[in-house]
Amino acid sequence: MPPTGDTAWVLTSASLVLLMTPGLALFYGGMVRSKTVLNMMMMSFGALGLIGVLWVLYGYSMAFGNDVGGGLLGDPFEYLGLKGLMTSPEDALPNTAFVGFQAVFAIITVALISGAIADRAKFGSWMVFAGIWATIVYFPVAHWVFAFDNEDAGVVGGWIANKLEALDFAGGTAVHINAGAAGLALALVLGKRRSWPKERMRPHNLPLVMLGAGLLWFGWFGFNAGSALGANNLAAVAWINTLAATCAAICGWLLTEKIRDGHATSLGAASGVVAGLVAITPACAVLSPVGSLILGFIAGGACALAVGLKYRFGYDDSLDVVGVHLVGGLIGTIAIGFLATDTAPGFEGGESLFFGGSVDQLGKQVVGAVAVLAYSFVITYVLGLIIQKTIGFRVSEEDEVAGVDITTHAESAYDIASSIGGSGSAGSLAKQSTPQHERV
């Protein structure tokens, strides 16, 4: 009999994760200045469109096709155009449900990177980068982490999942460390924004940020609990651990802000949500609820401190992709080696340092995290340099000062001109804005 309940849950989870990318657009959009909000949101929507197409054409096959490279890459031709996947055994989850669920992971991973280069990247160059990066970084890394061996079907998967046996339930390495390392590399390639850090570039719309964070949290239950691929106890444990860690992370971030700055802020609360979600992602199936509280609290405080590293080391990570996703992903992935418990359904029979006294799993987690970090950073840095030296990745100083919304998209998020009698069309808006550009 078809597993209709499991299928419904996976399709619902995929829809929740898809919602996370528009949620991310709101989250990132509110954090930038008003003259670049649309460009910031377009980078997420652009990634959504492009990566969805590539996933259908060859991305899924590269990630989940039978291994052709010693655990490094799936066969890109095996499921080309998703051939052969429209039918499934009656007693199994439909192939296309799994394809769709994994597609939205690929989409949001690419979109996450954009926050590191806000205010200064050419949209066309970003799209070129997104397509190439997904092809040579995300799809292979997803194979490493998410493609498991199936001896009965003669399927060989990725090296991290099967040879190293590092644990990553829902994407701490493949998604967050991967995107965080890429964000750091691109921030170094593109350089600092004009006047940063002398000029304080405050978020222009904090309610938008908090709305985006709320949508991310809502969708993240699909991200984590959906990774159980069924409506079962594993999904329920992942769900409650996701709730626990995120709530604790808010507290950890706000307490750190209060002690350090004297104020607990709305931006801190929203950022704490994301930090907790990132950290619990790889560990949500292997920790106890109390362990999740501990992990979330630590991650919230640590990420609040980590966002300040860019000022110490001088890299302009515009929206703290490094401080939240790279650091949070590392904390959550490595914490499995300390806090995983064999009472959790995803770690039955296993031993961690605090629950069993073994360092074996800790070592595996560190190797897996460092491997993804190093691969993503090096390949992204080289790719970013190539794009910068050929078609150009960074906008001109004039366009940066004017704002890439107008100069790139011929639009404004807040159309004051139309409210006082202007036509509001893209063409007329661009013309109306030209004198203003000259005055800046």
Image: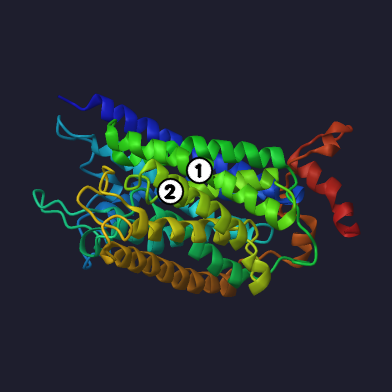
3 versus 160 height, above or below: above
Quadrant where the N terminus is found in the figure: top left
Extreme-left residue of the structure: 152
Q: Which residue is drawn at 89% across and 53% down?
A: 435
Q: Mark 2: few, some, or many residues within 10 Å (few <14, many ≥20)?
A: many
Q: Residue at x 84, y 38 (%)?
A: 416
**In front: 33, or 414?**
33
- Residue 163 — which label? none
Q: Is residue 41 among what the camera can see?
A: no
Colour convention: rainbow
**In front: 184, or 362?**
362
Q: Where is residue 139 in the image (x, y as percent from the top left)?
A: 36, 57
Q: Residue at x 36, y 54 (%)?
A: 339
For the residues labelled 1 and 2, the Cα–Cα distance comes to 8 Å
Q: Where is residue 172 in the image (x, y as percent from the top left)?
A: 41, 54
Q: Is residue 118 among what the camera can see?
A: yes
Give left or right: position of 318 versus 184: right
**In front: 152, or 335?**
335
Quarter location, residue 221 = top left
What residue would you read off at disc 1?
246
What residue would you read off at disc 2?
280
Q: Mark 1: few, some, or many residues within 10 Å (few <14, many ≥20)?
A: many
Which residue type does callout 1 highlight? Thr
Which residue type does callout 2 highlight? Ile
Q: Where is residue 82 in the image (x, y as percent from the top left)?
A: 28, 44
